[in-house]
Image (spheres, rainbow, N blue to C red):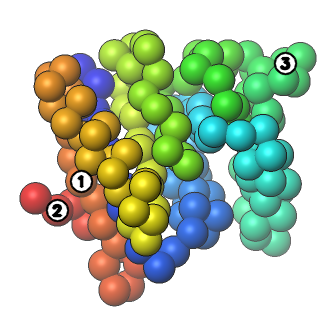
Amino acid sequence: MTEILFYHLQNMSIENVLPSLLEKSLERGWRVVVQSTSHERTEALDAHLWTYSDDSFLPHATAHVSDAEDQPIILSVEDANPNGANVRFLIDNAGLPSDTDRYERVVLVFNGDDGEALDAARLAWKDCKARGFEVTYWQADERGRWQRRE
């Protein structure tokens, strides 16, 4: 069964959080798709993931490259799963993909400082619960470590 994780960002940006979440995904041997809602955002994240750290490397590409199926991380705006990912990250209020049940894990990352993002996350939570997915809610503590909340 697909596990849906809701990551509530407060006083932090997706640019600060996403690289470590992607690193952990790769450490577990998962393939990943990161879905945003605009090509501009995808291109900005692509550039950021190449430069976010001097001592780390995240192999990735955008969905329009010719060898997308070979990439461990794909950045996209479409619902497609070009690299056979088993984990999907949804950012910038991207909606659940039509094939949500084909993933081991879907991680919905939302900005808690944005009312529209909070509303979208609440609707997605209700939808996921109604569809029978296992859902969990995560928030960072004062040290920036993710804690499961009830």
Disc on res. 67: 3
> Considering the numbered disc 3 on the image, is that residue within a helix, a strand or a loop?
loop
Is tag 1's residue or tag 2's residue first in the polypeptide sequence? 1
70 on left or right of 102: right
Of the residues shown, which amino acid type is indicated by label 1?
Answer: Tyr
58 on left or right of 98: right
Of the residues shown, which amino acid type is indicated by label 2?
Answer: Arg
Distance (Cα) linking label 1 and label 2: 6 Å
> Considering the numbered disc 2 on the image, is that residue within a helix, a strand or a loop?
strand
Residue at mark 1: 137
| Residue at (57, 69) in percent of width and height | 13
| Residue at (43, 55) in percent of width and height | 116
Residue 76, percent from left and from top: 69, 32
| Residue at (35, 56) in percent of width and height | 118
Disc on res. 149: 2
Q: Between tags 2 and 3, which lies in front? A: 2
Of the residues shown, which amino acid type is indicated by label 3?
Answer: Asp
> Quick check: can you spot residue 97?
yes
Is tag 1's residue or tag 3's residue first in the polypeptide sequence? 3
Distance (Cα) linking label 1 and label 3: 34 Å
Distance (Cα) linking label 2 and label 3: 39 Å
